[in-house]
Image (cartoon, rainbow, N blue to C red):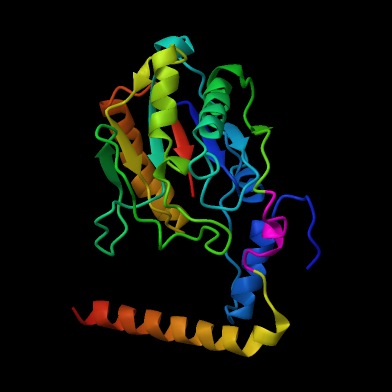
Amino acid sequence: MVDTDEPVPYMERTRQYYRALGYAKDYVWARHDEVPFARLAKPLPECRLALVTTASPADYSGRKRLWSGPIDPAPSRLHTADLAWDKESTHTDDRASFLPIEAAAKLADEGVFRGLTPRFHGVPTDYSQRSTSEEVAPKVLQRLRDDGADAAILCPL
Amino acid sequence: MPTVIIGSALDVVEHCGVPRFLFTDFPLGNPCGHPWDRQMQETIVRQAIGLLSTAKVPRTTVKAPFRWKQSDPGWRARYGRVDPAERERLLALGEERRRRKAESRAAKTKK
């Protein structure tokens, strides 16, 4: 395969891979015809921000579920083995490379924003659009509101 | 709830349509920066947070000004590649996965 500078076409690669595995039906990717857009309700320096990851807790039980963890103390590692990141090209040993608690906290110290919420939230990747939109998303939103988040930073692996 | 995504799957995210997206052109797994590169991670997070106030319309995408490691120029070709010589093995792998899934479903139905 020729190396190019083009962004990796993940949808096409995944389609071809699963066809090669013998799956008859292609996955239908989520799409919004109208994309929602909420503005900040206050200036950024006054905002509390929350982090959201697709990783599972380090003590992963084998069952993916919505979960939350404290940012302090920050977890040294999280469970990512069952997610479809590029295992041939990189690793996830550095938790900050996908859940950047320390980088965000440093920016809060500078005054870029008010601070992180006390919890981050984990939404392990679920390929069911219905489950994600109708069951999990409202619960995540409620947790964000409970924590006083003014906005959220989502960092999918 | 205002949101910004930091991610590395440009086509998936743009197909979906999201309010704000900072695209980091790296292999999937390290959306917020090269492992252990704290300076880069801080720059990326700063740029993403900035989009919360600077983005004016949905589907705002900004690309972070970083490349993957020079020591691995061939990374883009790797992910999910299907080698024609592996067709039979991949089909067998798929069969095994479908068999296991069917067994798991049957076990759940029995309970």
Of residues A142 and A148, the one drawn nearer to the viewer in this rendering = A148
Q: What x and y, as percent, mark residue B44?
A: 56, 31
Does B54 sit above or below residue B98?
above
Q: Which residues are magenta?
A: B70-80
Q: Residue at x 26, y 40 (%)?
A: A69
**Coordinates of residue B92 in the picture (x, y in percent):** 54, 89
Extreme residue in the front direction: B71
Which image quarter: residue A95? top left
Q: Residue at the spot x=65%, y=59% of the render?
A: A11
Q: Is residue B62 above or below residue B95?
A: above
The answer to whether residue B24 is above or below residue A13 is: above
Q: Nearer the viewer, residue B8 or A24?
A: B8
- Where residue A46 appears, as percent x and y from the top left, is 40, 10
Q: Residue lying furthest left in this view?
A: B111
Q: In this image, A26 relative to A151: left or right?
A: right
- Tag count in the figure? 0
Position of the N terminus of chain A by quadrant: bottom right
Q: Is residue A151 visible?
A: no
Magenta part mainly helix, strand or loop? Answer: loop
Say which residue appears at 36% left-offset and 19% top-offset.
A115
Residue A25 coordinates in the image, percent (x, y): 59, 73
Residue B68 drawn above or below residue A149: below
Residue B26 shown left or right of residue B102 in the figure = right
Q: Is residue A133 visible?
A: yes
Magenta residue check for A102: no
At x 62%, y 65%, the residue is A14
